[in-house]
Image: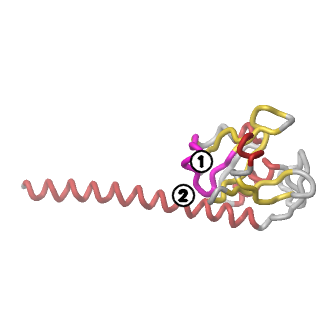
Amino acid sequence: MLKTKWLLILTLMFSMFTGFQSTQAASVSEGKQLIKTANRYLGTPYLLGAPYGTTRVFDCSSFTKYVFAKNGIRLPRVSHQQARVGHYVPKSKLRIGDLIFFSTPRDRGISHVGIYAGKGKFIHTYGEPKGVTYSSLNNSWWKSHYITARRVG
């Protein structure tokens, strides 16, 4: 009977552990798929207030909303609303596919969003002539305007 109890305990512990691992792996896989989708739009021009659904132009939040929607994840339309979905992630724990939020010169609150791509880089869209591009979180401007991050999905 003691042997049976230990076997049951070990089985439960193993299933809990392996379940955690598969959830972790799925999230990393989903993040990589988000970046793969985002990469299709590199160089697409930026337009403030770009209508959602078009792929001829994007603003930052229409871009993230579109990329996430293509991967089955619904987001609100604007960056400060997107910053309220999912759950908080500390900067030190960023994972590929996390949404990262910034302030901009026109607004001290959340007014810009990108998708973390790993190794200190993120993909987003802004300004002329850049459009959809990669930037470094270690760049002094982005570093000083970083506000928070969220994990969605």
* Amino acid type, mark 1: Arg
Q: Residue at x 78, y 43 (%)?
A: 112
Determine whether, in the image, residue 7 is placed left or right of residue 66.
left
Task: Using the image, tell me which numbered label, if any, was put on residue 27.
Answer: 2
Viewer-closest of 49 and 123: 123
The quadrant of the picture occupied by the N terminus is: bottom left
* Amino acid type, mark 2: Ser
Is there CB contact under 8 Å for labels 2 and 1?
yes
Give the number of callouts: 2
User: Please, which residue is most extreme toward the top here?
Assistant: 108
Viewer-closest of 42 and 37: 42
Magenta stretch in the rendered image: 88-100
Q: Is residue 75 magenta?
A: no
Q: Position of residue 60 (x, y in %)?
A: 80, 49
Q: Position of residue 62 (x, y in %)?
A: 80, 50
Measure how far apart labels 2 and 1 are at the Cα level. 10 Å
Determine whether, in the image, residue 140 is placed left or right of residue 59.
left
Q: Position of residue 26 (x, y in %)?
A: 52, 61
User: Please, which residue is most extreme toward the left here?
Assistant: 1
Mark 1, residue position: 151
